[in-house]
Amino acid sequence: MSQDLPTTSYALLGLLTFGDDLTGYELKQRADRTLRFYWVAPAMSQVYTELARLLEQRLVRATDDDADGRNTRRYRITAKGRRTLSTWLRSSPLEFPGLKHPVALRLLMGHLVEPSSTAQLLTGYLAALGERRAELETVRESLRGADEPGQPFRFPSLVAEWGLRYYDSERCTVESLLDALEDGS
Amino acid sequence: MSQDLPTTSYALLGLLTFGDDLTGYELKQRADRTLRFYWVAPAMSQVYTELARLLEQRLVRATDDDADGRNTRRYRITAKGRRTLSTWLRSSPLEFPGLKHPVALRLLMGHLVEPSSTAQLLTGYLAALGERRAELETVRESLRGADEPGQPFRFPSLVAEWGLRYYDSERCTVESLLDALEDGS
DNA sequence: ACAGCCATGTAACTCGTTACATGATTAC
DNA sequence: GTAATCATGTAACGAGTTACATGGCTGT
């Protein structure tokens, strides 16, 4: 029973393997600090939906904690959850990354607008890229001290590094696209 | 009337601005050669669904061509379609690209599996990346000759170049991740 | 007192997918 | 003749979103 969950379920389950129990709300925050950069930023409502599913399949266990008046459920991954997750990691076939790049999409149709409009698009993207990069940089900084081989945040740190490199490469490419547009117009 | 279409509608409409009329089938093929690399590869059924929508809003016009026995509808963008598209291009707010990167996601959970399993994941990705890159290279080659400033495929060519650079940057990063994993295990 | 955050959920809806259904043309 | 490709659509479903609904706690 219970084998093929949507990838986002595995992703959220994976965020519960870092040694602490989280509420739905906290899980959403963790997703926003990690998953967002290379997977998705699930809506609050989806986090609760996924947790309900994981609970139903006994991949997580919930502890009600009404002590503080607030209705609070804290979720912990179960042994079965760990087994399921590592089986998935080992056996799932390679899926190629999917990119949804509205900026590239708009550049494709550059012939429909004035060159200045396209340049403005790319300049705006460059700015957004800078902000994003700064956010991810902050995340990586916060992992410092536990990101050496063998330590708990080694892999999150490697992934963050990967993201930073990606943003750097984007900046570089977009800058040369802007140059090319100037020359050719 | 009629303004906010899903982005994929605009994307498909954009593929009809390169001077030729296409059948649904041909449009799908064009999407597979271009959109796939930085947007989506829509299912055949979705292409027809979107075309029906575009038709309903008079953004495309259809010509039935039953002459050859086959039921063939050829679609052409209308003046209204062009207006709608260029308005969208000029006025739509900047959306940041979204990445769905199953490989990065799995790397995040590297602590749950043996190092060899993670290394295998990355090696597999490197191979897939090579194939993808080759496909995109073929596409770019096919644009040669009409990709100079002012020519029809200038922008598609720039976008393809962007994609190639992205794949190169990925290859480079993944190689150094593999090095880091070897050192630290 | 009031705003902002913590906290949990339901309902309606859209996008996009896979599976199904059909049939003609082309190349071997 | 038969397999691959061209060609068009419908139906059922799933993943994920926004909007809605509720309420307590915390800082000023």
Image (cartoon, coloured by chain):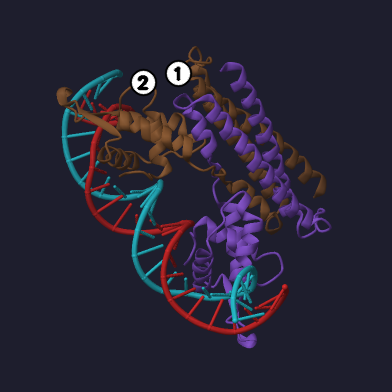
Chain colours: A brown, B purple, C red, D cyan
Q: Which residue: 63% across, 29% down? A: A165
Percent of width and height locating residue A116:
70, 48
Q: Amino acid at mark 1?
A: Pro
The residue identified by callout 2 is A19
Q: Nearer the viewer, residue A60 or B116?
A: B116
Q: Position of residue A129 (x, y in %)?
A: 59, 34
Q: Quadrant of residue A98?
A: top right
Q: CA distance from mark 1 to mark 2?
A: 9 Å
Viewport quadrant of the N terminus of chain A: top left
The label number, if any, that marks residue A112 in the structure image = none
Q: Which residue is mark 1?
A: A152
Name which residue type carries label 2.
Answer: Gly
At x 65%, y 40%, the residue is B127
Residue density around tag 1, few if under 14, some if 14–19, many if 20 or more, within 10 Å: some
Image height check: is B61 above or below A92? Answer: below
Mark 1 chain: A
Identify which residue, A84 or A66, lies in the foreground: A84
At x 36% / y 20%, what residue is drawn?
A19
Determine whether, in the image, residue C4 is placed left or right of residue C27.
left
Which residue is at the front of the view, D19 or A58? A58
Name the spot of residue A39 as percent of width and height, x first. 49, 38
Mark 1 vs mark 2: tell me if same chain.
Answer: yes
Going from N to C along the chain, the mark reached first, 1 or 2, is 2
Identity of the residue furthest to the top in this view:
A145
Q: Residues within 10 Å of mark 2 (few under 14, many from 20)?
A: few
Are dots 1 and 2 in contact, CB under 8 Å? yes
Is any part of residue A9 visible from this angle? yes
Position of A89 with respect to A28 (left or right) is right
The quadrant where residue A44 appears: top left
